[in-house]
Image (spheres, helix red, strand yellow):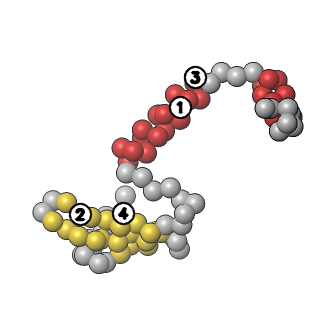
Amino acid sequence: MLVLTRKVDQSIMIGDHIRVVIVDIRGDQVKVGIEAPKDISVHRQEVYQEIQEENRRAVLSKAFNVQDLTKVLKQSPEDQS
């Protein structure tokens, strides 16, 4: 882990496209701004963990037959209505 000291309005670059800016510091709280390309998801860790857990539950609960799925995908839009 890289540990850095930054002041308000100072930033950190991650690669060429992600910028982390210290927006505000009040007491024991630090406000951080993150500028990243739209194709990169940025979440708080607890939210990220919830998303991952929900994805795992969805995969485990969705037992499907590959042959049935193949049939549905091969149907024309008119056949699916």
| Outermost residue, left side | 27
Which residue is tagged 2? Answer: 30
Closer to the N terminus: mark 1 or mark 2? 2
- Give the foreground label among 3 and 1: 3
Q: State the separation of the CA atoms marked 4 and 1.
A: 30 Å
- Label 1 belongs to which residue? 56
Identify the mark nearer the N-term, 3 or 4.
4
Element under disc 2: strand
Q: Amino acid at mark 3?
A: Ser
The CA span between labels 3 and 1 is 9 Å
Q: Is residue 53 shown left or right of residue 12?
A: right
Cα–Cα gap, marks 1 and 2? 32 Å
Q: Which residue is mark 4?
A: 2
Tag shown at residue 61: 3
- The residue that appears at 12% across and 63% down in the rendered structure is 27
Q: Identify the amino acid type marked 4.
A: Leu
Pinpoint residue 4: horizontal percent, then vertical percent: 30, 68
Secondary structure type for disc 4: loop
- Neighbour class for label 3 at 10 Å: few (<14), some, many (≥20)? few
Q: Earlier in the sequence, mark 4 or mark 1?
A: 4
